[in-house]
Amino acid sequence: MPLPLLALAIAAFGIGTTEFVIMGLLPNVARDLAVSIPAAGMLVSGYALGVTVGAPILAVVTAKMPRKKALMGLIGVFIVGNLLCALAPNYWVLMGARIVTAFCHGAFFGIGSVVAADLVAPNRRAQAIALMFTGLTLANVLGVPLGTALGQAAGWRATFWVVTLIGIAAAGALAVCLPKHIEMRETSILREFDVLKNPQVLMVLGISVLASASLFSVFTYITPILEDVTGFSPHAVTYVLLFGLGLTVGSTLGGKLADWKLLRSLLSFLASIVVILTIFAATMHEPVSAMVTIFLWGVLAFAIVPPLQILIVNRASDAPNLASTLNQGAFNLGNATGAWLGGCAISAGAPLTSLPGVGVSMACGALALTLLSATLDKRARRLSIGQAA
């Protein structure tokens, strides 16, 4: 892995850990702050909405900044936000701190994706993005299980103290490893926002929302599911959260296949997510089969990320920074929507076993929108060829 990509991956590891570890700590946070599980689940939604709102704002703020300076500033916001999480005295301060932390997320991954893609040959751009996102997936393999174990043993605040230290280490890696001068594409803010007039760009954003909602309508509540339905003890759940191992495999697989057949691989992954969530509704009752299904779900859930990220960069070639950043906002809008839908189902009295059905419906929507996008793309190419002839 080239050193600049390694530095981006370290930062992605820290950001991924702080985003996802809260799900392993939901019961601990709920008990300590005297709130319900659905209320604690809204900490996931609050973070995701912070990404959604913060992504376009910080894309504008950093548009004219040198890429290295922008990335360093964003990781600084991350460090401050996690420090506030560790010190938060009550639920609402913690919610505010999560939102502050989230503001750096979309812009960091958006700018970082474009930087990563520009550092390699054109036929390896999706794989370069996947390498950066390896840090995010490793957060689920190492950061989330270890952070969950630490939070259960020493209190959830200890986890955020450690994540703050990871942020400081990431800032050092970025300072040392990123080239001082990274090429910036000349553009204007108004031209960047013109990309939103492109229906194909809007469809990619919609696919990202629905795909993430499919994941988070179930994954937000994976700890209660594994404890109350599957029958794992709280400490055993930490090891089952190696779901992240599947995410790492999926990110690598998605990057390689996206550089080969972009839309075909995306369609295949989404269809497989529908199947695996349907299967999980049955296998969640038995520990071994639940673990196998969760691993396969993790592979598919993150295999779609590199294809979607490179797809929107390709379809918004005149404004890649904003489009890439907005796609991160779309992912997190889906995170918030999924967590909210799952919480609504639980609050309405639906059992935890019903949540995979919510995920299936969202994945079917993403699949349908991808099929529509692929059809329109094929029709546009045929029209272009006909006009050229």
Image: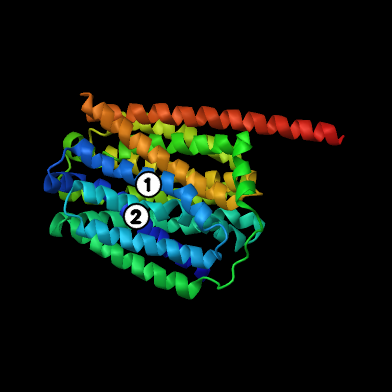
Closest to the observer, 154 or 279: 154
Q: Is residue 222 left or right of residue 364?
A: left
Which of the 4 image quarters holds residue 361? top left
Res. 50 mark = 1
Nearer-the-camera pick, 208 or 33? 33
For residue 240, say whether it is visible. no
Secondary structure of the residue carrying tag 2 is helix
Q: Which amino acid does label 1 sit on?
A: Gly
Q: Residues within 10 Å of mark 1 (few under 14, many from 20)?
A: many
User: Where 212 sits versus 145, above or below?
Assistant: above
- Position of residue 257 relative to residue 68, above or below, is above
Local crowd at mark 2 within 10 Å, few (<14), some, or many (≥20)?
many
Q: Is mark 1 on a helix, strand or loop?
A: helix
Q: Tell me: 242 left or right of 389.
A: left
**Residue visible at 77% across and 31% down in the picture:** 383
Position of 265 with respect to 139 (left or right) is: right
Question: x%, y% of residue 21?
Answer: 28, 52
Residue shown at 51% from the left, 49% from the top: 325
Where does residue 151 sit, x and y in percent of width and height? Answer: 18, 56
Q: How many labels does the image show?
A: 2
Dot 1 or dot 2, earlier in sequence:
1
Q: Check whether the beta carbons of the residues at disc 1 and disc 2 lie within 8 A of each other.
A: yes
- Residue 235 placed where, x, y %? 17, 51
Image vertical order of residue 374 relative to residue 300, above or below: above
Identify the residue at image location x=19%, y=55%.
156
Residue occupied by mark 2 = 101
